[in-house]
Image (cartoon, coloured by chain):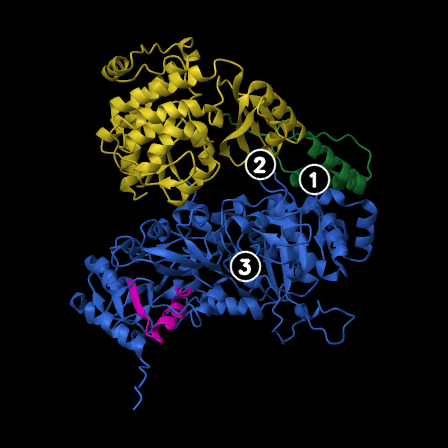
Amino acid sequence: MRSLWLFPGQGGQHAGMLDQVNQQLKEQVEKWTNVKLVDTADAYQDSVQIQLSILLLQIDQVDRLQKLDWNPTLVAGHSLGVFAAAYAAKVISKEDVFKLVALRAKLMQECYPEGYGMGVVVGLSRSEVKKLVAQVHSETNPVYISNQNSEMQNTVSGKISAIEEMLELAKENGASKAKLLHVPNPSHSPLMQKAADQLNAFISTLDLHKPSCIYLANYNGHAVKNLEDITYDLGNNLIYPVLWETMMQVALEYQPTSSCEFSPGTAFTKLLKAKTDQLNIVTLSTMLVDDADYLFNKWEKNND
Amino acid sequence: MTEEKNWHTHRDAKNARLASASSLLNGKFAKTKDVVEVLNALIKPGDKVVLEGDNQKQASFLSEALTKVDPERVHDLHMIMSSISRPEHLDIFDLGIASKMDFSFAGPQSTRVSQMIADGTMTVGDIHTYLELFGRLFIDLIPNVVLVAADKVDHEGNLYTGFNTEETPTIVEAAAFHDGIVIVQANEVVDKLPRVDIPSDWVDIVIPADKPYQLEPLFTRDPQAITELQILMGMMAIKGIYAKHHVQTLNHGVGFNTSAIELLLPTYGEQLGLKGKICRNWELNPTPTLIPAIESGWVQSVHSFGGEVGMEKYIAARPDIFFVGKDGTMRSNRALGQVAGQYALDMFVGSTLQIDQWGNSSTVTNGRLSGFGGAPNMGSNPTGRRHSTPAWQSLKPDDDPLAKGQKLVVQMVETFGSNKKPVFVDHLDAEKVRKEAKLANVPIMIYSEDTTHIVTEEGIAYLYKTDSMEEKKAAIEAIAGVTPVGLRSNPKEVKRLREKGIVALPEDLGVRREDAKRSLLAAQTMDDLVEWSHGLYNPPAKFRSWS
Amino acid sequence: MLDITTGSDGFGKVWQNVLNRFFARYPLNGKFIVHDFGATPGVVNLRLTQAMEALKDEK
């Protein structure tokens, strides 16, 4: 069985999602980061709460699966998801990854207190979106093309006023959907450079290890097996578009037989299903780790 | 006294290599567990190596072993491959084992190929059609080592390749007669082969594989996925092209459009009284959707480039139709099939992802370099052809006494793709890809000058009848729907083109859209196909329903 | 940060083109309602022309 493990980023968080998480691990994380994880709808207005809680959820799930001797052939994280992906690939230790993400979330929050964000455009190709972005972008009114979620779904990041202009243009040019996202900063654009610089400085103090499997990098959509590229991705994916569509194309060329999406949500499994019907699928937000273990055993026995 | 030139340097080199591996060999046979050491001993840096990545068959045991060789001993290999199909075909570049690639098709690895060319991990010699690449194996890409796959081998080293013979004999011949080394992985060692496909004199090393070579069912299409639009287009094609030009010999490019046509012959084709008059002799991989037409008596013969998983028993039971050895199993041959496809066919029908305003077709998109495979060879007019058939002759221009006929090359596309992006565009994405991938020329699959007909859901454009590029563009616009290209068409022009017989809408052909129903298909499900085959067709697992 | 949609709410100009092209080729009277469940323009054109043939038959 060759498995592709998918780790979502921010967006799917919801109150109570930490209910089933290992409580000892939760307390350990709170000690390491000095942040109490409250797990309420109110708390999830705060990026630090969101990012650490999602990471906790994912790390807990990885631990449970790896304890049952399940390991990935390929890991792919979307934005925040790269950290749990790196952990699953045995690149980074548990304590380090939580401290790293705590810093990341704090830096992202401090970067752009207001007036900046992201939008999504559906129904135009990436090159079409690039053209329209270029028509609006200026130094004082910046907007950049950001994530490549699928062939016809891209995000843009920048100043809200510029984004709104661009979204109007997109609708006029045939986009089936063009709207703002509930994201308070211009993630995955050059505007986040300062945050990336500080993140990289911290990363250089960490003790990281060669990956135990193939890691799909956000910043260039490549399958990567060396530590340098993964380290670069962890520190810099903030300033690069997440090339998710390319990552998925490359992942499928490695001929995985199963996929496992970690919590929260099933958004990336949906995207993957649109590309192939040949995968056995697990989504940990809709089933217990024990159910996943049962399925993995069944598929491995059938040589799937 | 001048020194005698050594005219047998290749032979000497080959003997030296084989000698260096003699401790690993028992006659021609090496042990399964010694495969990596055998490759380390027999392959030298800079070698030209053919690794069998065929369309269907993959020498997967050897390709996995190749990733484990010592890059200090084996590096800078120049790979020559029909089809880049498996991840390890590219891993050897990441690992510093290979540095250059000449290939034909890369569909299953097109994104990584694109990335590796862009960042310089892989240098591409060039991209070819299958037949071109096979040709160069005997000219300037003569291999030093070939790594191929066989089903069975006997104790002398004779090979049985059976249904999935594909290009193995061609690859082996290029090495065997120019002092290359032939290394074969075999599924089984037996006392007696069903028949000899490749004689042991051509073979140097045999290694029993740890598991059977990988085989993909690439030409199987589930009839349930065929849409009404594809049925409408199939009806138009049968009446407006197949019947009109009396097409007797043909190849169908793999796809749902052509599967629909195959399933319409016993029903719609029968209604039109066309049995025996069209579609008699085929060059085609044994697609299951042809079964109803075969069973109904439409088909006289089918020669195949390769096999198709699940069709083995059916083929063995129909030796009058297929190319079956006296042992009862099929033999395929890609090189000869491509020769037939080039020179011996009335018509090629295929599909594509993009067509530009002039009628050039391409399947290349940004970031994915899938190469050419066999389509440009099938989908081009062979000016070297001399023999005449009614279909070929029907395309001869009236106005030139020295003219001759032409192969029908038909492209069938819906005006918009499933991603709701226009298929008809002013400029192909391929134009941009040429720059990105540093190719000498724009990677066009089928050129406008070779394209004789285009079929869309709107109608047929008989491009061979146009007398200028302006008129050809107008004909394309008339059937390009509401794409930006199609929106340039105007009703007056469409009327003129219809009167000249250059454009035909369904009503001009007497085809009713109301009749384009799934019930018109001779088989609507995989189960229907199994029934048509009297239980002989055995669909692979992924095509079987849960019931 | 991620949003998925199905169907198409905003393909308006394309549908207008489909209808214009249809009526330019097949001048007919009648009320046509297009339900868009994510179909391609080709499929919509097919439905319109199938409806037209049905109308012609009734005459």
Q: Amino acid at mark 1?
A: Asn
Crowding around mark 3 (Cα neighbors within 10 Å: few <14, some 14 to 19, many 20+) is: many
Q: Secondary structure at mark 1?
A: helix
* Distance from the alpha carbon under mark 2 to that under mark 1: 24 Å
x and y, in percent, of residue A157 in the image: 52, 25
* Distance from the alpha carbon under mark 2 to that under mark 3: 27 Å
> Residue furthest toward the front?
B1
Chain given the colour yellow? A
Q: Amino acid at mark 3?
A: Ala
x and y, in percent, of residue A287 in the image: 34, 25
Please tell me whether residue A43 is drawn above or below residue B128 in the rendered image.
above
* Residue bearing mark 3: B375
**Labels 1 and 3 within one chain:** no
* Distance from the alpha carbon under mark 1 to that under mark 3: 30 Å
Chain given the colour green? C
* Residue bearing mark 1: C45
> Magenta segment, which residues?
B165-185
Decide which of B23, A160 is in the foreground and name it.
Answer: A160
Name the colour assigned to chain B in the rendering: blue
* Residue bearing mark 2: A125
Asked whether residue A283 is in view, the answer is: no
Name which residue lies at 32% across and 52% down. Answer: B96
Closer to viewer: mark 2 or mark 1: 2
